[in-house]
Image: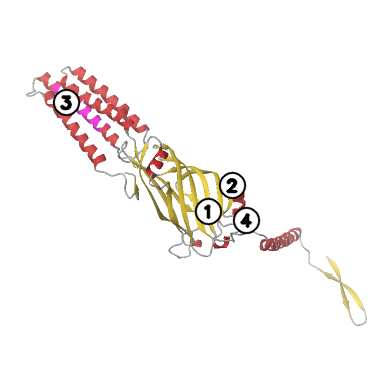
Amino acid sequence: MKILRCSHSSDNYSLSPVTLPKLSVSQVRNSVIALLILLGVTSNAQSFDRQDLGYISPPDTLVEVDANLYINKIYNVNSVEETYQIDGYLEFEWFDERLSFDPQTADTPLIFENDKASDLIKSNVWVPAFEFVNIQGKQDTQHFQVSIKPDGTVTYEERFFGVFHTEMNFRKFPFDYKKFVVEIEPFSYDQNFLKFNTLTLYPDTSDSCNALDATLGKDWNLTGINVYTDTSLYGQPDALNTGDDEYGIYSKAVFEVHAKRISGYFIWQVLLPLFLIILASFTIFWIRDFGTQIGIGFSLMLTVVAFNFYSASILPRLPYNTFIEYVIMFGYLFILFGIIVATVNHNLEKRDQSSFDLLKICRWLFPVAYLLIMVVLISTNLLFASGTADIVYNCG
């Protein structure tokens, strides 16, 4: 490619051709792309500097948050999945001096609900995000509001529904205790920026037990409530690790409702029939016909198996035995031993080698042994064990 280059002296001008190197199509294309990228980055950088990102920084000082939980109802307790549903109100309150205003200039407090509150959070007010730690699935929030007082106190309140999970101890089932737990943490700010301060589980008046007891339905009796603050440590990537020992430690609010299962149904529908079935198995020691003895023994054994299937259907797979499973297990053993005794006695009678009547001995030995085992089992699992530990408010 050639172009004309202008040269001049004091007297005249002259044009001389200049030869430029040839550029391939790919070189031209790459140059154009590079130029466009450069122009785009410059334009984006300028717009990034100018645009309002809507970011609102937290207060300069540590934010202390008061959390209040009001439980309307605890329902759909699923023992197999170890879950329960809660309908309640959640309230957070903190102080932000930047939002204080003259009470003479506006009605107090300023209240914003639902869409208005959402617009306020997006535009003007710093509201930290909180999350339920032990919730399963998505939280359902029906209504929420933000209120601001003249001194800068901000209150966020919402009504929520959620399915929560807590590991349950079934060792004493059906005489077991449960802790219905709600755990809350800030989503973004560790304890260097935000900490929970005062926690309240409502209602907390003198009739709290009666009020909260009504939220548990017909299957549970309230035994106490407990609230406390705790912390959770989350590992951080090396790139984000500042070396601060408190980095990645989040403040946590814990609300607990302690309850005892109402066991009347299981006593009358499961334990009492099972107890009578096992006692009925001892009648084989009063019967001399061997065929009848074996028929009774195996029939009652199958009945106990049916009770075992029922208990397995209402409990999760556990690495330990529950009270009701111990009762069923001893039922298996005593029925099996009864069949063995009847068989041995029958063989001895056939050979005329019995110097004593084995059936007469077992008529009293088996019932007494079974009753003693049941007394020990009941006393160790029910009488000498407490199900309400570390409860700050005991309902008795």
**Measuring 77% from the left and 63% from the top, which residue is drawn there?**
23
For the residues labelled 2 and 1, the Cα–Cα distance comes to: 14 Å
Nearest to N terminus: mark 3 or mark 1: 1
Residue 155: mark? 1
Nearest to N terminus: mark 2 or mark 4: 2
Residue type of the residue flagged with mark 1 = Thr
Residue assigned mark 3: 341
**Magenta stretch bounds:** 328-345
Where residue 63 appears, x then y in whole percent?
Answer: 49, 60
Could you say whether the residue bearing mark 4 is in a helix, strand or loop? Answer: helix
For the residues labelled 2 and 4, the Cα–Cα distance comes to: 14 Å
Residue 284 is left or right of residue 169, and the answer is left
Residue assigned mark 2: 114
Nearest to N terminus: mark 2 or mark 1: 2
Where residue 192 appears, x then y in whole percent?
Answer: 47, 62
Query: Badge 3 local density, few (<14 within 10 Å), some, or many (20+)?
Result: some
Nearest to N terminus: mark 3 or mark 4: 4
Query: Badge 4 local density, few (<14 within 10 Å), some, or many (20+)?
Result: few
Residue assigned mark 4: 123
Where residue 262 appears, x then y in whole percent?
Answer: 34, 35
Query: Badge 2 local density, few (<14 within 10 Å), some, or many (20+)?
Result: some
Residue 389 appearing in the image: yes
Task: Provide the major secondary structure of the magenta segment.
Answer: helix
Could you say whether the residue bearing mark 1 is in a helix, strand or loop? Answer: strand
**Measuring 62% from the left and 51% from the top, which residue is drawn there?**
119
For the residues labelled 3 and 4, the Cα–Cα distance comes to: 83 Å
**Res 81 quadrant in image:** top left
**Res 150 quadrant in image:** bottom right
Image quadrant for the N terminus?
A: bottom right
**Looking at this rendering, what residue extends furthest in the left direction?**
355
Image quadrant for the C terminus?
A: top left
Residues marked 2 and 4 touching at CB (< 8 Å): no
